[in-house]
């Protein structure tokens, strides 16, 4: 199933009619019907039963719908990322923190950071200090925040507050 077919399938599942789905996607109803028929032909099974002008999802459609939504969300994320790259809005800061600072310090720090760097993405992960060290070594975290001064010599640390 190609991206456009996925988009059409999801629109029909959500809208319930070809006309409403076509309106959602800003395409003609005949064009949407063609894509849907072609998709069913390629898949080798029917996605919808036509009943009184409405489309009723088949068991197969209901089975694949959650996966289709996940794929669609992934494609949307990829589109956002490529747009960000094109516009020069790049950057991801991954913060690993032990539970006390994760709950006490990070919320305010993230708010302040986002105000100064709205185009940067922030991700946080709460973990014990040993896991934070492993994440830093593996490159899975950009920085770590912990209330522990017993760190291995290969981890650069700075006291804050």
Image (cartoon, helix red, strand yellow):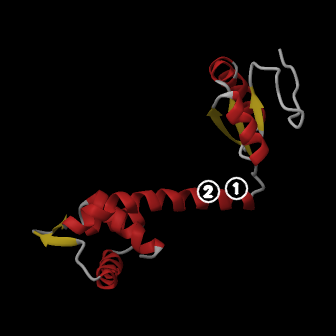
Which residue is painted at 63% across and 35% down in the image?
Answer: 125
Q: Nearer the viewer, residue 9 or 159?
A: 159
Which residue is painted at 65% across and 18% down in the image?
Answer: 100
In the depicted structure, whether residue 83 falls above or below residue 39: above
In the image: residue 154, left or right of residue 44: right
Q: Are marks 2 and 1 in contact (CB under 8 Å)?
A: yes
Secondary structure of the residue carrying tag 2 is helix
Counting from the top left corner in percent of width and height, residue 42 is at 34, 84
Counting from the top left corner in percent of width and height, residue 13 is at 29, 61
CA–CA distance in space, label 2 to label 1: 6 Å
Query: What residue would you read off at disc 2?
Result: 80
Residue 35 in which image quadrant: bottom left
Q: Is residue 20 visible?
A: no
In the image: residue 35, left or right of residue 60: right
Within 10 angstroms of label 2, few (less than 14), some, or many (20 or more) residues?
few
In the depicted structure, whether residue 20 falls above or below residue 91: below
Secondary structure of the residue carrying tag 1 is helix
Q: Residue furthest top?
A: 161
Q: Nearer the viewer, residue 134 or 39?
A: 134
In the depicted structure, whether residue 106 falls above or below residue 8: above
Q: Is residue 16 visible?
A: yes
The quadrant of the rendering that contains the C terminus is top right
Which residue is painted at 40% across and 74% down in the image?
Answer: 5
Counting from the top left corner in percent of width and height, residue 21 is at 32, 64
């Amino acid at each position: 199933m190609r991206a456009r077919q996925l988009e059409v399938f999801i629109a029909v599942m959500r809208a319930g009619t070809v006309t409403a789905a076509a309106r959602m996607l800003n395409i003609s109803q005949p064009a949407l019907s063609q894509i849907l028929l072609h998709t069913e032909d390629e898949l080798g099974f029917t996605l919808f039963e036509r009943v009184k002008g409405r489309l009723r999802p088949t068991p197969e459609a209901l089975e694949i719908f959650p996966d289709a939504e996940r794929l669609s969300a992934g494609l949307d994320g990829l589109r956002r990322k490529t747009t960000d790259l094109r516009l020069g809005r790049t950057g991801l800061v991954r913060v690993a923190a032990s539970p006390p600072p994760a709950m006490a310090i990070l919320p305010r720090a993230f708010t302040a950071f986002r105000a100064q760097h709205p185009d940067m993405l922030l991700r946080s992960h709460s973990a014990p200090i040993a896991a934070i060290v492993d994440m830093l070594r593996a490159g899975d975290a950009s920085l770590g925040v912990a209330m522990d001064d017993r760190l291995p010599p290969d981890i650069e640390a700075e006291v804050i507050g």
